[in-house]
Image (cartoon, rainbow, N blue to C red):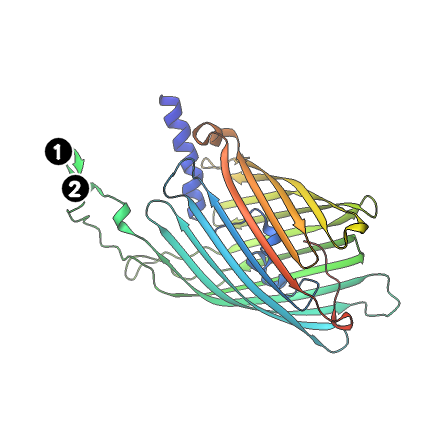
C-alpha cells in the first residue's frame, strides 16, 4: 500500500509540474498557431480552420479530468511576385483538476512569408517566415471544489465547507497581455519531399498572473524549437518525422516521432497516416523520464484532415493510471486557392 501511495504521489507530481506550464497538444503539428506564430499561413490554400481537443488524467481524476480546447483561423494574401502576408486568430481554453483551474487566451497572429531563390527555373520552393502574435488572457479558480485547513472540524473530523477558508485569494487573475514571436524556414522539393525548422518565444513580456492583489507571480517565458519534413519511400508511401522541444521555466518537454503516410493515386486525394510518438520530460526530481507513448492515426481528404491519438502512460505513471493516459482529436479544413495564387507548403 505504501508503495502505491508513493507511486501515486510521483504521478501527481507530473500533473502539478504540468500546471506550471502552458497546455501542450501531442499532435503539435496539427495545432500550428499554438506552436509558433510563424506557422500562420503555412498551408496550401486560401484559408484554414483548425480545432484541437485533449483530455487527460481521467483515470486519476474521474470527474475532473484535464481538458484543453483550441481553435484557430488563418488566411494569406499575395504581396508582389511570390511573397505573402498571413493573418489569423487563435483561442485556447484549458481546464484542470478539482479547482476548475481555467486558463483562457485569445491572440491575433500576423506573419510575412518571404520567398527565397525566386528564379522561375528553380527545382524547389523555399520560404523564410517571421511571425508574431498579440493577445489577452486570464486565469481563474473555483474554490467550491477545494477545502483548506481552516475548514477541517477537529470535533467531527470532517470538512465543513460552511467555514471560511481563511485565505485572501481572488477567484481570477487580472486580464493580461501576451506577446509571442517566431521564425520558420521551409523548402518543398516535390509533392512528397520537404523540410522545415523553426522556433518561437512565448510570453516575452512575462505577464503577471497572480491571484493575490499586487502579487508578483508571472508567466514564465516559453521557448519552442521544432523540425520536421517528409521523406518518400515511393510515390505512394512516405514518412513524416518531426521533433518539438519545449522549455518553460524549469520544465522541459520533448515530443518526437513520425507518421507513415500512404496514398493510392486512384483514391482521388485521399490518404491515411499512422504513427508513434515518444515523450521525454524533466521529472519532479530533476532527471529525465518518458511518461508516455502516443499512437496516432490521421485521415486526409481533399480539404479535410481528421486526426486522433491516444497516450499510453509508462514508467511511474503506469500503476496509478492503469496505463491510461490521454486522448486527443484534431480537425483541419483547407479552403483551396486559385492555382496562380496557391503556394506549396510542407505537409505537417
Judged from the image, the secondary structure of the residue bearing numbered disc 1 is: loop
Q: Is residue 22 visible?
A: no
Question: Which residue is situated farthest in the bottom direction here?
Answer: 80
Q: Secondary structure at mark 2?
A: loop
Q: Residue 69 location in percent, x, y?
A: 48, 54
Quarter of the rendering containing residue 87: bottom right
Identify the residue at horizontal 64%, vertical 52% (top origin). 226
Residue on which disc 2 sits: 160
Q: Which residue is at 20% across, 41% downward?
A: 149
Q: Residue at x 40, y 51 (%)?
A: 95
Counting from the top left corner in percent of width and height, residue 52 is at 54, 53
Query: Compared to 35, does 12 lie above or below?
Result: above
Give the alpha-carbon distance from disc 2 to disc 1, as whole Å: 9 Å
Front residue of this view, candidates 53 and 216: 53
Which label sits on residue 125? none
Q: Is residue 106 visible?
A: yes
Q: Does 322 sit above or below residue 76?
A: above
Crowding at label 2, few (<14), some or many (≥20) Cα neighbours within 10 Å?
some
User: Is residue 308 found left or right of 57 in the rendered image?
Assistant: right
Instruction: Say the numbered circle drawn on residue 156.
Output: 1
Residue 194 is situated, as x and y percent measured from the top left of the image, at 76, 54
Q: Quadrant of the N terminus?
A: top left
User: Residue shown at 34%/64% (left/top)?
Assistant: 174
Q: Is label 2 in contact with label 1 (beta carbons under 8 Å)?
A: yes
Rendered position, 303 above or below 53 = below
Amino acid at each position: 500500500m505504501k508503495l502505491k501511495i508513493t507511486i501515486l504521489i510521483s504521478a501527481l507530481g507530473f500533473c502539478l509540474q504540468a500546471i506550471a506550464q502552458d497546455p501542450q497538444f501531442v499532435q503539435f503539428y496539427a495545432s500550428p498557431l499554438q506552436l509558433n506564430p510563424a506557422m500562420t499561413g503555412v498551408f496550401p490554400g486560401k484559408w484554414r480552420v483548425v480545432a484541437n481537443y485533449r483530455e487527460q488524467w481521467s483515470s486519476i481524476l474521474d470527474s475532473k479530468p484535464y481538458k484543453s480546447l483550441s481553435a484557430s483561423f488563418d488566411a494569406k494574401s499575395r504581396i508582389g511576385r511570390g511573397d505573402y502576408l498571413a493573418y489569423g486568430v487563435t483561442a485556447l481554453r484549458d481546464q484542470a483538476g478539482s479547482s476548475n483551474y481555467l486558463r483562457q487566451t485569445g491572440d491575433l497572429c500576423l506573419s510575412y512569408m518571404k520567398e527565397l531563390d525566386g528564379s522561375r527555373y528553380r527545382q524547389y520552393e523555399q520560404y523564410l517566415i517571421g511571425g508574431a502574435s498579440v493577445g489577452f488572457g486570464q486565469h481563474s479558480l473555483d474554490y467550491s471544489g477545494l477545502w483548506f485547513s481552516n475548514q477541517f472540524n477537529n470535533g467531527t473530523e470532517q470538512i465543513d465547507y460552511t467555514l471560511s477558508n481563511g485565505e485572501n485569494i481572488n477567484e481570477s487573475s487580472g486580464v493580461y497581455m501576451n506577446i509571442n514571436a517566431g521564425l520558420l524556414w521551409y523548402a518543398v522539393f516535390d509533392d512528397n519531399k520537404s523540410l522545415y525548422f523553426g522556433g518561437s518565444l512565448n510570453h516575452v513580456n512575462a505577464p503577471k498572473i497572480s491571484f493575490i492583489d499586487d502579487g508578483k507571480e508571472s508567466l514564465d517565458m516559453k521557448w519552442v524549437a521544432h523540425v520536421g519534413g517528409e521523406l518518400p519511400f515511393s510515390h505512394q508511401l512516405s514518412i513524416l518525422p518531426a521533433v518539438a522541444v519545449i522549455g518553460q521555466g524549469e520544465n522541459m518537454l520533448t515530443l518526437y516521432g513520425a507518421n507513415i503516410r500512404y496514398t493510392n493515386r486512384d483514391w482521388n486525394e485521399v490518404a491515411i497516416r499512422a504513427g508513434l510518438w515518444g515523450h521525454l520530460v524533466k521529472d519532479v526530481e530533476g532527471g529525465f523520464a518518458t511518461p508516455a507513448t502516443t499512437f496516432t492515426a490521421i485521415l486526409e481528404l481533399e480539404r479535410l484532415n481528421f486526426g486522433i491519438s491516444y497516450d499510453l502512460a509508462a514508467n511511474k505513471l503506469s500503476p496509478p493510471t492503469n496505463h491510461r493516459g490521454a486522448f486527443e482529436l484534431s480537425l483541419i479544413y483547407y479552403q483551396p486557392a486559385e492555382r496562380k495564387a496557391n503556394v506549396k507548403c510542407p505537409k505537417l
